[in-house]
Amino acid sequence: MKRLQLLLPGPVSLHPEAELAQALPMINHRGPEFRELFKRVVAKLQKVFGSEDVAVLTASGTGAVEAMLVNFVAPKEKILIIQTGTFSDRMAKTASAIGAEVELLEPPEGEGASPEDVDEALKRSGAKVLGVVANETSTGVVQDLPELAKVAHERDALILVDAVSYLGGHDMDMEAMDLDAVASATQKALMAPPGISFVAWRERAEEKMKALPKRSVYWDLESYKKFYEEKFETPATPAVSVLFALDRSLEIILNYGLANWIRRHKAFADAMNFLVESAGGSVYPKEGWRSNTIVVPLLPEGVTPAQAKALAREKWGIDVGGGAWKLKEKSIRIGTMGWYGEDAVYRALSFLAELYGGDVEEAFQKYKSSL
């Protein structure tokens, strides 16, 4: 099998040590070796999230978002969800499925939600929960989490955040940002294989969780907290091999420096956006709302997503994603997550230059000078 550089919205290419960690011998998930592994992983996740309470779930990011909603949204409660793409739509679908009453707020095209619009929508709807996709993987729209948290709390609402493609690629400190609960997963900017996800939460959310009726066994976050505090274990069998890889990938990221790791994503994204726009092309969303981890170039006239993806794979050895949501037929998505060197960055820029024109060397120097 030919090894491609994955520059997808996820999953991502792994550091060789994280890849090899998956081949470690299987261990008893109720034994001392697992407990030591799990303590290490949770301690690192606490640093990345900026929260003491982190549940580790064997599930995709979608599972973590569902767990977050089940534990922190009451039956028939109204939730306001900011609609910026496929995953905010999925959050709304999940909230509806668990019996919540959903109201959507769609910001202007190519933008995130302003605090003023969110405040007005919370006031009008009376919603006591605000659902936010921090980094919309389908469109590359990023939200201003501290400002949205401030507005939510002024309206006595919780803020629940899907940070699946945000965590590790953007600044995240739940305490400093005053976020109530955050869901994320392994296979994006944390550079680990798919299969594990997380929910982290703080005091407001915990108080509400304790007051709500239990509606799930597998997604019961209180049971995850109890198992960790009493045994350093999980309630159900976890994906042990993924945890081995996650342990190694988090160690690599923290040794690299979390701020440096985030800067690396932003530098790559900025360089690609610069190349496309300096050549006369367009990217989504508008400046000021752009992701560090997902770049969304709008394709030149006459070029289809399938053609662009084939060019990336066959000539440049990189695997990029197709467009999504309203941009499905006119864009591609390029991820800046995972393990890559300067060669992969140069190839990605060269691929874009073949589509749009532009100066690869100038964009590459912009990337290097931003690290």
Image (cartoon, grey):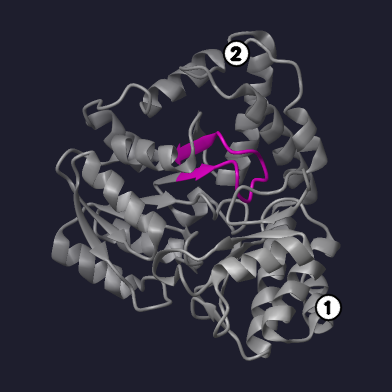
Above or below 336: residue 210: above
Measured in 3D between alpha carbons, the distance from the residue under mark 2 to the one under mark 1, in whole angstroms, is 47 Å
Q: Nearer the viewer, residue 141 or 20?
A: 20
Above or below 41: residue 338: below
Residue interval drawn in magenta: 183-201
Mark 1: secondary structure? helix
Q: Nearer the viewer, residue 78 or 325?
A: 325
Return the x and y of residue 224 as percentages of the image width and height.
45, 23
Quarter of the image where one finds residue 98: top left
The residue carrying mark 2 is 29
Mark 2: secondary structure? loop
The residue carrying mark 1 is 365
Say whether residue 187 is magenta.
yes
Return the x and y of residue 120 as percentages of the image width and height.
22, 71
Q: Amino acid at mark 1?
A: Gln
Q: Nearer the viewer, residue 135 or 41?
A: 135
- Which residue does the image show at 66% across and 40% down from the upper left? 192
Return the x and y of residue 155 as percentages of the image width and height.
24, 59
Q: Amino acid at mark 2?
A: His
Q: Is residue 83 visible?
A: yes
Quarter of the image where one finds residue 34: top right
Where, quadrant-wise, is the C terminus in this rendering? Answer: bottom right
Q: Which circle marks residue 172 in the picture?
A: none
Return the x and y of residue 207 as percentages of the image width and height.
30, 35
